[in-house]
Amino acid sequence: MPAERTTRENLRQTTLWNKPEVSSSTTSTSKSKSKKDSIERLDTDVILCIKPEFVKLISTREKNYEYRKYKLRSSVERLWLYETAPTSAITYVMSTTEPKTPGQVRDPTGVGNDDFDAGKKVSKYGYPVTGLWRLRSPVTSKQLKETYGMAVPQGFCYLPKKLGDGEKLEDMEKIF
């Protein structure tokens, strides 16, 4: 015998004390935003979360590739490096080109390059560091939220246009 379907009108959630539960859908607004309310983003720039020790290695040119499990859009030209705690801010912007795959790097001078080429890393894509700029004033997680309307990305996100317009490479300190 098939199960009897209950219509939405007959469905009622109750609490432990058998009192009707107030539906959360009627008391709060949706967290998702419509397309017209969403943040305009740049296809050429990505914010990457990265540990401070790796940012230091990149800035001293000891690490010349940034390795990731995922491939970003081919339009990406710059990676904005969001240093995780204790820094918790975007501190550098690195320029990059098309990513390499294991076996294509062939440069033993950079940290992790040999392991990547040998397929020993979980990462499948290596983004070459072709240039590096330091922001004059780091963009903190608080500023990301309050000024640009976004939370710290989990991994990566495309850069809000407002942030790209406000932070120009010409105004940053060129490291190399």
Image (tube, rainbow, N blue to C red):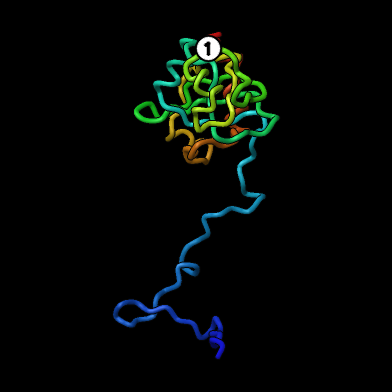
Name the residue tied to disc 1: 108
What residue is rendered at 49% in x and 29% in y? Answer: 121
Residue 146 visible in the snapshot: no
Q: Residue at left 65%, top 24%?
A: 77
Looking at the rendered image, the quarter that the C terminus falls into is top right
Q: Position of residue 148 (x, y in %)?
A: 53, 36
Q: Nearer the viewer, residue 126 or 52?
A: 126
Q: Nearer the viewer, residue 11 or 41?
A: 11
Q: Quadrant of residue 174?
A: top right
Q: Is residue 125 above or below residue 92?
A: below
Asked whether 6 or 40 is in front, the reply is: 6
Most distant residue in the bottom direction = 1
**Residue 76 in the image: above or below residue 40:** above
Q: Please provide percent x and percent y for residue 36.
A: 66, 50
Q: Position of residue 117 (x, y in %)?
A: 56, 22
Where is residue 172 shown, x and y percent of the image?
Answer: 55, 15
The kind of residue on which mark 1 rests is Pro
Location of the N terminus by quadrant is bottom right
Residue at 63 percent of width and 33 percent of height: 72
Write the residue at 41% across / 30% down.
84
- Outermost residue, left side: 17
* Residue 115 visible in rendering: yes
Vertical relation: 146 (above or below) 7: above
Q: Quadrant of residue 168?
A: top right
Total tally of numbered discs in the picture:
1
Q: Secondary structure at mark 1?
A: loop
